[in-house]
Amino acid sequence: MSVYRQALPQLGDQLFITDGGLETSLIFHEGIELPEFAAFVLLKDQQGRDALKKYYRSYARIAKQAGLGFILESPTWRSSPEWGGKIGYTRAELHDINTAAIELLESIREEFESAGQPYVISGCIGPRGDGYRAENRMTEAEARDYHEEQISSFALSAADCVTAVTMNYVEEATGIALAARKQGIPAIISFTVETDGRLPSGETLDEAIAIVDTACKGYPAYYMVNCAHPSHFESNLAEMKHIDRLRGIRANASRCSHAELDEAEELDDGNPEEFGLDYRRLLTRFPGINVVGGCCGTDQRHIEHVSLQLVRQDAA
């Protein structure tokens, strides 16, 4: 049963952290092979589940020690019909995988959550296509129908919300929000942007939020930006009319463009200390943002520095 579905605690003033770059950490730091960048395959056996628990516990401890809330984002970015089918999973198996992912996060929440420190469980949804390129675009209706299957699995689970990450065009984001509304589960939409602060499809972050909100009558609980370095979008945030709808950031460690990251053979983990300072500056400038974490190239070091800066800021 969902604990927070009716009233997501991150909609208040409390600060929350998330984990870092799940897939890049597993591949480059743990030496685990992930077909099609799909971390959900680790749920198929005990060894894989243990690896995921080790990963999530490391971040849960950071939140616990810092006195911050925590968003447990499921390892299901690729567990939708098309991506799952590419690596041999049936739709019935994907339903079981999505359910098992939430159950694993429930065990982490039971271990770490305490009064005043909520641990929110989110069902992670990824794009149908490439996260970096807005190609083979769907209509809103097509996106709704495609993603509803995965969302329905989360709606039947203990997930408190669903979060669509690395969204690169508005029709897919809108379809996901419409499917979540139909299934009765809160939806969070996270867009990715290029080095100029625009979506790969060309819209500004502000324009994308306005388009989705209009199409869905404001259904998304809030919006985020992920898979881009702060230097790619910080100046754009100052110009946003809808900055109040942006509550979360999961930035990349690297300053590289999406195209450069696609070609990279080694992990660019940037500077963890600088990463933390970037977040302190962003939250000082934009105090409505209260959900922060990492994306590609980030790991526990980056989130430790972020949490340290958040605690210092909160105490100031």
Image (cartoon, rainbow, N blue to C red):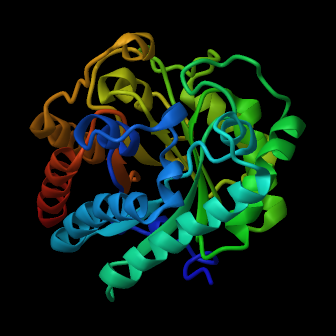
Which residue shows up at 21% across the image and 36% down it? Answer: 278
**Residue at left 68%, top 41%?**
88
Residue 116: horizontal and vertical position, in percent?
32, 84
Q: Nearer the viewer, residue 19 or 45?
A: 45
Q: Is residue 287 visible?
A: no
Above or below 190: residue 13: below
Residue 90 versus residue 53 in the image, above or below: above
Q: Nearer the viewer, residue 290 or 91?
A: 91
Percent across and percent down for residue 182 are 84, 61
The quadrant in which the N terminus is found is: bottom right
Q: Is residue 299 above or below residue 73?
A: above
Count of numbered labels shown in the rendering? 0
Residue found 67% across the figure and 27% down from its top: 129
Q: Picture coordinates of residue 272 (x, y %)?
A: 14, 38
Residue sitting nearer the eye, 113 or 24 = 24
| Quadrant of the snapshot with the C terminus | bottom left
Left or right placement of residue 9 versus residue 206 in this view: left
Q: Position of residue 94 (x, y in %)?
A: 69, 55
Tell me if 32 is positioned left or right of 267 in this view: right
Q: Quadrant of residue 2?
A: bottom right
Residue 184 located left or right of residue 256: right
Name the residue at 68% across, 33% down: 86
Pick whichever, 202 or 130, lies toward us. Answer: 130
Residue 130 can be seen in this image: yes
